[in-house]
Amino acid sequence: MNTRWVAARAITRVLQEGQSLTTALDNDLKAVESNQDKAFVQAICYGVCRTYHRLDFILNILIEKPLKVLEVKALLLIGLYQLNYMRVKPHAAVSETVQAARNLPWARALINGVLRNYLRRQDELERQADNVKTAALSHPDWLIKQIERDWPEQAGTILHENNQPPPMALRVNLTKTNREDYFRLMADHDLSAQTVSFCPDGIILDKPAPIEALPKFADGWVSVQDGAAQLAAHLLDVQPGHRVLDVCAAPGGKTAHILERHPDVGQLVAVDIDENRMLRVNDNLRRLNLQATLIVGDATKPDGWWDGKPFDRILLDAPCSATGVIRRHPDIKLLRRETDIAALTILQLTILNAVWPLLASGGMLLYATCSVLKQENEQQLQDFLSSHDDAIECLIADDGWGVPCEVGRQVLTGESSMDGFYYARLIKQ
């Protein structure tokens, strides 16, 4: 199996079928046997998605008319990516990419000619790309404009960080060990890392590693979770005996973190509409030896699953544009549309309105998104507060992370090696 052809198929699934890159790779990597080849395919696919808008701009200069066969376009993007971003010798990048099209004889001469033409004109083409904003920043135009409107001073940093490979962050399971002891265990396995000052159970690896290399991973001593996502369990301020609801809980990282930090919680109910994703929550909790009440249900219609008993704490990890995690999922730049944002804000507000009555008087709701767009975050919460007299904001203290907003606090992508995340806390009077 030609690895570049496997990568082209996965990229085509994203471009043509609208699949997420994760789903496409889960399907196409089944045909690849060696771990080294799998890593190569993943590196190419993530790299092409990360730099797609720049590569596509250059490709459109090099070809006379749009390509009808998307696998061929994907192979050309793969070839351009290798030539500009990977340590593959140019002659090997060209010949191996041509060879990947062996089932499309007509395309081989085209691929060879386009890639060799790029090599001849590389400096000129790259300069042209540097002078076109969407290509230079490798983002869709609508998203560049939105981020620049929302964060005029920080937009350049956000867009730059979106195009960087993400760090690998871990969360130590405090029911099994503590961070200091796990740090020493990592050192014994030649794994170097840094601590996260405002996440007392957080670790950032100096270099990403396969989970199989993490000591005691299978025994539930540690989980992979970004530092920004780890803030949720701290902000929720769960007390002994509290009844807690985690809405839109899958895949369960925050659910598990709450249980790890608060083993004396009265009950934790985790709800998600996707049955398959709830299976992942169950698997994660089993590995960590934790227990929660798992419900497959629609957060917009709690009457179908709520038992009528109020909750002391609610975590709403709202469906969002995921613009804060683009560096982990660069295909978001290809799949997300400007029109999606309005629909998402309607869904977020619908869920907020639906679960607010489930909160006990004096209880706290923590609203979270992995978005950096104000329409989904502080503007959403401002609108909610203005229409709910029984809701007041519980300010989030400045503990060394995030930007204060009119309501809530925003982590911008790359800050302290974290993903982009928004949090706001509401108290029910």
Image: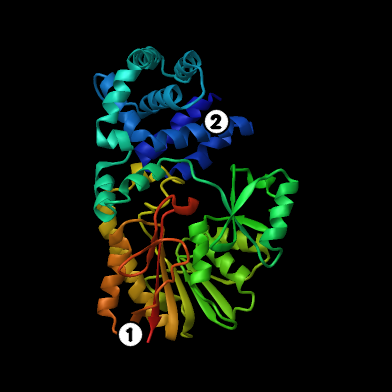
SS class, disc 1: loop
Image quarter for residue 393?
A: bottom left
Q: Amino acid at mark 1?
A: Asp
- The residue indicated by pointer 1 is 390
Give me the disc on residue 40.
2
Looking at the picture, how far across and down is residue 33, in whole percent?
A: 62, 32
How packed mark 2 is, by other alpha carbons closer than 10 Å (few <14, some 14-19, many 20 or more), is: some
For this rendering, which residue is in front, 288 or 134? 134
How packed mark 1 is, by other alpha carbons closer than 10 Å (few <14, some 14-19, many 20 or more), is: few
Q: Residue at x 36, y 75 (%)?
A: 354
Q: Amino acid at mark 2?
A: Phe
Circles 2 and 1, Cβ within 8 Å, touching? The answer is no
For this rendering, which residue is in front, 172 or 311? 172
Looking at the picture, how far across and down is residue 417, in whole percent?
A: 49, 50
The quadrant of the picture occupied by the C terminus is: bottom left
Does the rendering let one see residue 11? Answer: yes
Give me the disc on residue 252.
none
| Disc nearer the start of the sequence (2/1) | 2
**Between marks 2 and 1, how big is the CA–CA gap?**
54 Å
For this rendering, which residue is in front, 383 or 311? 383
Looking at the picture, how far across and down is residue 212, in whole percent?
A: 68, 46
Q: Residue at x 49, y 45 (%)?
A: 166
Left or right: 133 in relation to 199: left
Figure check: 114 above or below 195: above
Figure check: 208 above or below 79: below
SS class, disc 2: helix
